[in-house]
Structure formats: C-alpha cells, structure tokens
Amino acid sequence: FPVTIAFSAYRSGSDQTISNATNTKVQVNTESFDTNNCFDSSTNYRFTPTVAGYYFFVGTGIFGQGSNSVQCYIYKNGSVALVNAVQNQASGSGNVSLSVSGLLYMNGTTDYAEFYVYQSSGGNLTLYAGSYLTYFQGYLSRTA
C-alpha cells in the first residue's frame, strides 16, 4: 500500500493580529487531522514530514476590513518557497480572502513547511480564526 501522509490545521480561538509590512507566520494551532503526526500545532506551527517526496500544500487566510495589499506564502526551511500569484487589493470596505498552493519536494528528515502572510495597510490587521477561514493543509503526492 502507498504511504499516505496528510494534515489539515487551522487557526482557532482568537483572531491573529498581523503587523504592517512584516512577513508573519500564521499560528495554525488546531489540527483537524494529522495522519503521520508530522504537524506541530503548539510550538512552531510547521509541518515536518518523515517520508521523502513531493508534497502539495494549501494555505488560506481571510483578513478583516481595511485590508490593502495582502499576500501569502508557503515557506520551506525558513525561506519563501511558494507565493500567491496575485497581490490582492481591497477598497477597505470588505474582507480579503487569499490563498497559496503548490508542490514542494521535502527530504523526509530536516525539511519543514510553514504558512506566512504579509500585509501593507499602514497598521495592524486581523487574520480571522476559524476552520474554514484560515488554514494550512498538505499531503504527500508522490514519494521520492
């Protein structure tokens, strides 16, 4: 049988404050599932797979009103690896939803992935908590 590794985690409890002009790690602190116990939802908020292969990741977040320019990223080993394709602009009168997705090779030992967001509204913004609002997911697409 093929190895099945997958996780789904989301931001629960309180909303997360995102500072202006700073890449900020999303604290996805609740797991819906984690089939191989590879996601850390309490300290580092990262996925560290134990099987080498190609992993598909999705990160989605909703910013509160007043959003101006927002972006999201998947980081690999502390550096940007995937970026959302469009920099979203909002008029300031509504919420902004954005996501990033793509495939990354992970070595199964030391590589890890994290979900980050960025905003440049001129002040702090709210990233909403909720299982369907702000989440980070991934699965093994193919072993190496």
Image: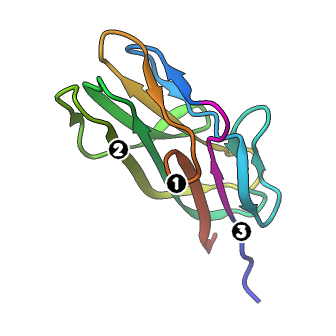
Is 49 magenta? The answer is no
Q: Nearer the viewer, mark 3 or mark 2?
A: 2
Could you say whether the residue bearing mark 2 is in a helix, strand or loop? Answer: strand
Question: Looking at this view, is 129 or 98 the one in front?
Answer: 129
Q: Amino acid at mark 2?
A: Ser
Residue in view at x 68 percent, y 41 percent: 46
Q: Residues within 10 Å of mark 2 (few under 14, many from 20)?
A: some
Disc 2 marks which residue?
97
Question: Looking at this view, is 41 or 102 the one in front?
Answer: 41
Instruction: Give how far across and how far down residue 65 sits, in percent.
Output: 32, 28
Instruction: Give how far across and how far down residue 60 sits, in percent.
Output: 45, 48
Residue in view at x 26 percent, y 27 percent: 69
Residue in view at x 36 percent, y 23 percent: 119
Measured in 3D between alpha carbons, the distance from the residue under mark 3 to the one under mark 2, in whole angstroms, is 27 Å
Instruction: Give how far across and how far down residue 6 sits, in percent.
Output: 68, 66
- On residue 132, the disc is 1
Q: Which residues are magenta?
A: 7-14
Does residue 19 sit above or below 107 in this rendering? above
Looking at marks 1 and 2 on the same chain, the residue that comes earlier in the sequence is marked by: 2
Could you say whether the residue bearing mark 1 is in a helix, strand or loop? Answer: loop
Q: Amino acid at mark 3?
A: Ile
Looking at marks 3 and 2 on the same chain, the residue that comes earlier in the sequence is marked by: 3
Asked if marks 3 and 1 touch (Cβ < 8 Å), the reply is: no
Toward the bottom, the furthest residue is 1
Q: Amino acid at mark 1?
A: Tyr
Could you say whether the residue bearing mark 3 is in a helix, strand or loop? Answer: loop
Does residue 87 sit above or below 6 in this rendering? above
Looking at marks 3 and 1 on the same chain, the residue that comes earlier in the sequence is marked by: 3
Measured in 3D between alpha carbons, the distance from the residue under mark 1 to the one under mark 2, in whole angstroms, is 11 Å
Disc 3 marks which residue?
5
